[in-house]
Image (cartoon, grey):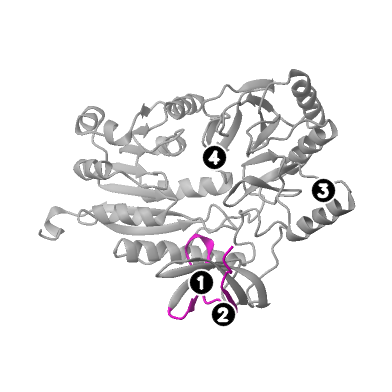
Amino acid sequence: MKKRTLIENVEITDVAAEGKALFRHEERVVFVTGAVPGDFADVEITKKRSSYWEGKVVRIVTPSKIRIEPRCPEFGTCGGCKWQHLPYEEQLKYKQREVVNNLTRLGHLTLPQEETICASEKQFEYRNKLEYTFSNRRWLTGEEVGENRRRAEAGEPQLEMRCAGFHVPGLFDKVVNISTCHLQPYPSNEIRNFIRDWGMEHNVDFYDLREQHGFLRTLIIRTSSTGEIMVILTLGHEDKKNREALLSELKAKFPEITSLLYVINEKHNDTITDQEICVFSGQDYIMEQMGDVKYKVGPKSFYQTNSAQAQRLYEITREKAHLTGNEVVYDLYTGTGTIANFVARQCKKVVGIEYVPEAIEDAKVNSEINDIKNTEFFAGDMKDVLTADFIAKHGRPDVMIVDPPRAGMHPDVVKTILDASPARIVYVSCNSATQARDLQMMAHAYRVVSLRAVDMFPQTHHVESVVELELIPESERPQE
């Protein structure tokens, strides 16, 4: 292996994109993981490009005044919660700055006076869903690797390699064993640890991610604001005796589980959206509530993972739509209709469009549950569904709410939105860089009148942004 460059005792000067920090070395920007502004650190360079380098901290020489002790012992290894070493107020500052910088520098947009970022009430235990992986190849620390070598030389048994936890970033076959994850409330850790310990006690196979075989494979735990709990255990092959024994003991140990499901997944990938979900006990769904709207959440349903903050996000979205009760609203990328149903009682009609047919069926069910009768939902590719004929049939929108995936909107969709010319657009985004690109395509016809960043994921660099646009009168538009 090539010897890597080590840069000693450098001062970290700023925060960069994707949760990294940075400093300059010989007129070159170096992006680094594991540091905060104000740290003096020894940095090992892991990647060299002509315009920038990347590196990782190997030693903190002098810690920054703002650096705090991470709560999680696996910080820096499992890949989640990359900002646990930053105080929450600092996290908010950098998230707000990222949104503003992307919209102004990438989108070349003129912004109104900034609104304060909407902070999350909870900084830990805020997630309602986590997915864990069982593996027979536990990630070992340097000390543990050395211990295994010593044991091998002494003829002693190797360290336990079976585990349940999260993947190491960039290594598909290595999993960090997690004893306590601080992102989801009780009984998430207790359920995961129980299944892992049961598997070890009964000597069942943990999944081999290289060879693609094993009994215990993945685990999804969903907790709801209504107190209901869903557990989805994925097994690599059927073993009726062990499956029934494990699920029976899990049910007895945690009677609060209201939906206990399992999947037999023999494919070479972990997705279960194309698999049969079997009910072992309870219902095949849990209920969520946001304000006065209830949502039925199935094992394959998408639902915002921070329930309390999702309500604030949708309240802000509804506020920026300025609904009076007379508007036709189009909700693009509606998913399971969470936003559509949330705003339905404040407008004349909502038309929701989404690519995934199963999500549209969930959206219709959620309208029925809440006795909402002024919603219509349609499945299909956005650029194919949202056409001039579709708009003529279902009504020209007064307001459009768009909440696309991270990749943003297809140019054909942007063109159709411009042709529809709604008086107001509320653009919700989890990626302000692609949001800036899309808004730039509409800048000749729409102006930004308000912007609010919303922190959905404390301890990470991810941030949502809600931008309110209003149609510029023809007489005020620049002449081409």
Q: Residue furthest top?
A: 240
Q: Percent position (x, y) of residue 246?
A: 78, 27
Residue 258 to residue 104: above or below: above
**Which region is colored magenta?**
1-27
Q: Looking at the rendering, in which quadrant would you find the C terminus?
A: bottom left
The CA span between labels 3 and 2 is 38 Å
Residue corresponding to mark 4: 290
Lower position in the chain sequence, tag 1 or tag 4: 1
The CA span between labels 1 and 4 is 39 Å
Lower position in the chain sequence, tag 2 or tag 1: 2
Whether label 2 touches label 1, CB < 8 Å? no
Q: How many marks?
A: 4
Q: Mark 3 belongs to which amino acid? A: Leu
Whether label 1 touches label 4, CB < 8 Å? no
Q: Mark 4 belongs to which amino acid? A: Met
143 sits left or right of 319 in the view: right
Residue corresponding to mark 3: 159
Whether label 2 touches label 4, CB < 8 Å? no
Q: Nearer the viewer, mark 4 or mark 3?
A: 3
